[in-house]
Amino acid sequence: MSTLLSPPAEAAAAVEPSAETVPAAGLSSGLPGKERPTAARRLGALATLAARAGWKSLAVLLFLALWELGPQYLAAPATRVFLPPLHEVLAAGGRLVDSGQLQSHLQASLTRSVSGFSIAVVAAVALGLVVAWYGWLNSFLNPLLELFRNTATLALLPVFTLLLGIGEESKITIVAYAAFFPVLLNTIAGVRTVDPLLVRAAKSLGLNSFRLFQKVILPSAVPTIFTGIRMAGTSSILVLIAAEMVGAKAGLGYLIVNAQASFLIPDMYAGILTVSVLGLLVNVLLVALERRFSRWRTAVGSGN
């Protein structure tokens, strides 16, 4: 009976193809089956990133092209004196770099901005944590903080100049003042918006105040704090440039106003372009630091 049900050996051999006659799945050009899809995915990812980068930079490229071609072909000849094309501005910047003037002015501005910005961040984060943690202190200081926050920083520039002179102290102080309040207010907001359930759970586990700040409060408030830090970084650069225009002998603000007074218009635009690039680099650096200190959020999100 078993011999009737089992297929003949020749039929079985005909039904089951030999491994020698069927090419292995996914083998092509000597690559293993998983390598070709992986390489294709990588190429696709690179193409997608290139397309996104090109799309994001398209507006900037169009603006630069308009800056180059507009004064030459769209504006009146007299306008080119006050709005030179981009290549003349870049050439003026190259001359400033060759002579070392741009580096010295940039170093002076960076020293002032970094000093004032660092003082403001340390003081504002420390005070913000204390004010946010103690409700009575927040209600007591909030009217005064709102008063100073709504006072334009540049309106106080003559005060800082009269009290501290036109030296480095006044520049660093006004930068610290401009950067202080965005960081302070965002620190207070970040601490006060921490989930109370997390605080209660941490206290139920026996964490003391220091460990509670280290493990719960600060990590939860980091994104909001860095929002204030990024705002403060932009404000510190803008205020410093304005302060250097009023009374200084070095710095990007001094370079811009001195070039304008000397009718060196391409040099003036080269200084303005340097300020724009500096602000962009500062923002990129702060975003990278925010990602570095917020890695725990990415780790939590990736597990879902």
Image (cartoon, helix red, strand yellow):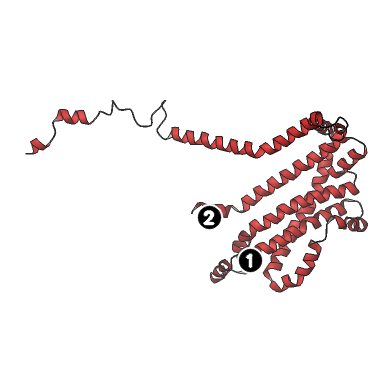
Q: Amino acid at mark 1?
A: Phe
**Where 109 falls versus 93 (above or below)?**
below
Q: Amino acid at mark 2?
A: Val
Residue labelled with disc 2? 300
Give the residue drawn at x 77%, y 55%: 179
**Where 170 falls versus 4 (above or below)?**
below
Q: Quick check: 281 left or right of 24?
A: right
Q: Quick check: 183 left or right of 46?
A: right
| Residue with the most extreme left position | 1
Q: Quadrant of residue 97?
A: top right
- Is any atom of residue 85 visible in this view? no
Residue labelled with disc 1? 210
Give the residue drawn at x 77%, y 30%: 69
Give the image location of residue 1, x and y in percent.
Answer: 6, 39
Give the residue drawn at x 80%, y 65%: 147
Q: How many marks?
A: 2
Give the image location of residue 29, x and y in percent.
Answer: 42, 25
Q: Secondary structure at mark 1?
A: helix
**Where 64 falls versus 281 (above or below)?**
above
Q: Secondary structure at mark 2?
A: helix
Real-space Cα distance between discs 2 and 1? 23 Å
Q: Quick check: 128 left or right of 253?
A: left
Give the label on residue 71, or none: none
Along the line of sight, which residue is nearer the eye, 128 or 258?
Answer: 258
Assess whether mark 1 and mark 2 are in contact (beta carbons under 8 angstroms).
no
Of badges 2 and 1, the one in the foreground is 2
Q: Please tell me how crowded label 2 is: few (under 14), some (14-19), or many (20+) other residues with Cα within 10 Å.
A: few
Give the image location of residue 243, x and y in percent.
Answer: 86, 50
Give the image location of residue 188, x and y in percent.
Answer: 69, 64
Give the residue drawn at x 44%, y 35%: 37
Sequence-first tag of 2 and 1: 1
